Amino acid sequence: MKLDTASRRRIEVFELRLRIELATIEAYHRVCQPESPLLYINNVPGRISIVIGLVPPEEVTEAAGLVRLVRHVYGQASDILHGRSSMLDAPDVIIDEWRSIVERLETLTGVRSNASSR
């Protein structure tokens, strides 16, 4: 089955959203070190702030800025996936920017190394 461009784009958006959720779970594990593993997380926009606990004090401002960007990407991705946005076929430049933000989050949370590339 051949997917149209808009469908492929929505899959890319879904992947980015899942990567944010996985990075949030990883940040929770690294900061809180729970006895039982967390398998899913709800309220991702509210809980993504936990990544601030992963940085030294001099990097808190930068991490807070990243949290703000990740919340934006997560919200926009959710709007696209749930049909609340007219941007069903997001342009490449936006997806590339979102991917860059998610990669920064993954690097901060330890999901990906600085040397990793897609």
Image (cartoon, grey):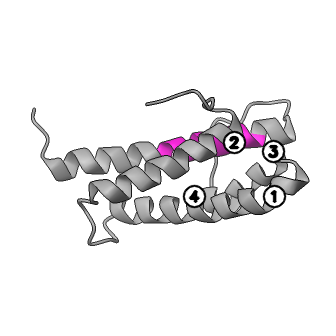
Residue picked out by circle 1: 60
Apparent side of residue 109 relative to residue 57 in the rendered image (left or right)? left
Q: Residue 41 in the image: x percent, y percent? A: 64, 47
Residue picked out by circle 2: 108
Q: Residue 58 in the image: x percent, y percent? A: 87, 55
Q: Amino acid at mark 1?
A: Val
Identify whether 2 is placed above or below 95. Answer: above
Q: CA distance from mark 1 to mark 3?
A: 9 Å
Q: CA distance from mark 4 to mark 3?
A: 16 Å
From the viewer's perspective, is the residue at label 4 or at label 1 nearer?
Answer: 1
Q: Which mark is residue 70?
A: 4
Residue at 29%, 51% (x, y): give it. Answer: 10
Residue 59 placement: quadrant = bottom right
What range of the chain is rendered magenta? 18-28
Q: Residues within 10 Å of mark 1 (few under 14, many from 20)?
A: some
Specify the principal SS of the magenta part: helix
Residue picked out by circle 3: 54
